[in-house]
Amino acid sequence: MSIRTFRKQFCSPTSADTAVAHHRWLTDLGSGVFFPAIVQCTGSTVEFEHIPGPTASTDDMPLVARTLGRLHRAARDRGLRCVDANQPFPLGTGRTLAGFAEPRRGRLLVALSTVRSPLSVQLVDAWLERASVLPTALYKDANPRNVILSRSYGPVLIDFDTLTLAPVGYDLAKLVVTTSMTFGALSQEHILMALHAYTKGLGVEPEVCPLEHLQIWAEFHHLLTSPWLGEHYCFDWTEVRPWTADEVATAAHAPTPIRS
Ligand SMILES: Nc1ncnc2c1ncn2[C@@H]1O[C@H](COP(=O)(O)OP(=O)(O)O)[C@@H](O)[C@H]1O
Ligand SMILES: [Mg+2]
């Protein structure tokens, strides 16, 4: 019996190979999180197992957050706990995952020249550097379109194009910002529920991933996703942000915590 597939066309065979390598590494973590199987990879085309179900929406956020936490916990158990998020991480196949700061710095600085943000160039630079001393996890582009709610498996993570190291909480902030930019404002209570679910999944104390860090990383995502406002996203983060710009600025000026 042939299984139904989702065929994804990449811009080059190299991009397709990279997505396949990310998929393999994530699957091998043994996190208990579900990913679609890869059925075939030919040149620039990858065929994934088709997962029926809707993509994530606002109400799914705590469940998706817990799933992200479980994935990050497994990745930390498999080596990320001991590494600096700003250094490349070897995947063991001759490939590496990029560090956090290097691929983002240029785009953030360009965005800061056109997008209104409570973060200055100095603060963005300081927090890119601080990633080195914060607990390390992953960025896998946790926007709601990259999660399918399957009846059989629960939340299934899709889209393996981008995978880098990032501080704990950074990908959760992506989920918060992009869910708000897609569906409209979320209450701070709803976000705290998601944060609680994430730290539970991650198996850490809440202090390891405080709300203040989420607030700062959310502004990074605002800067980086602003080009897609009007395309994937209908709501401007500055209009749906559930805390004030001053609160973010205060959080961003707080002293550096230590890696745990
Ligand atoms: N394995 C899959 N099964 C079912 N639908 C999928 C699958 N993979 C992707 N999709 C659907 O296609 C959309 C785009 O796929 P994605 O891999 O996220 O591409 P993009 O790089 O354009 O974001 C997803 O939001 C989802 O709706
Ligand atoms: Mg996607």
Image (spheres, helix red, strand yellow):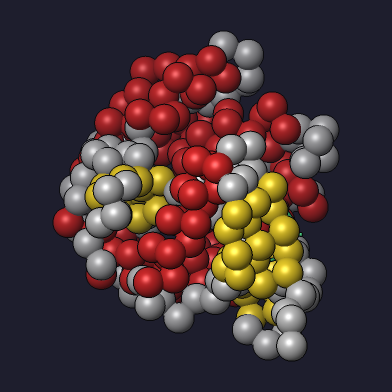
- At 62% across and 20% down in the image, what residue appears? 116
- At 27% across and 41% down in the image, what residue appears? 88
Q: Quadrant of residue 252?
A: top left
Q: Is residue 62 visible?
A: no
- 186 left or right of 140 in image: right
Which image quadrant: the C terminus?
A: bottom left
In the rendered view, would you say 230 is above or below 120? below
Disc tally is 0
- At 51% across and 34% down in the image, what residue appears? 220
- 175 left or right of 207 in image: right
Q: Is residue 67 visible?
A: yes
Q: Quadrant of residue 219?
A: top right
- 49 left or right of 124 in image: right
- Find the residue positioned furthest to the front: 42
Query: Which residue is at the front of the view, 161 or 145?
Result: 161
- At 35% across and 23% down in the image, what residue appears? 125
- 130 left or right of 151 in image: left
User: Could you tell me residue 32's position as x and y percent?
Assistant: 45, 81
User: Could you tell me residue 212's position as x and y percent?
Assistant: 43, 46
User: Could you tell me residue 17's position as x and y percent?
Assistant: 49, 49
User: Could you tell me residue 118's position as x and y percent?
Assistant: 53, 26
In the rendered view, would you say 118 is above or below 197? above
Which image quadrant: the N terminus?
A: bottom right
- Find the residue positioned furthest to the top: 113
Q: Quadrant of residue 229?
A: top right
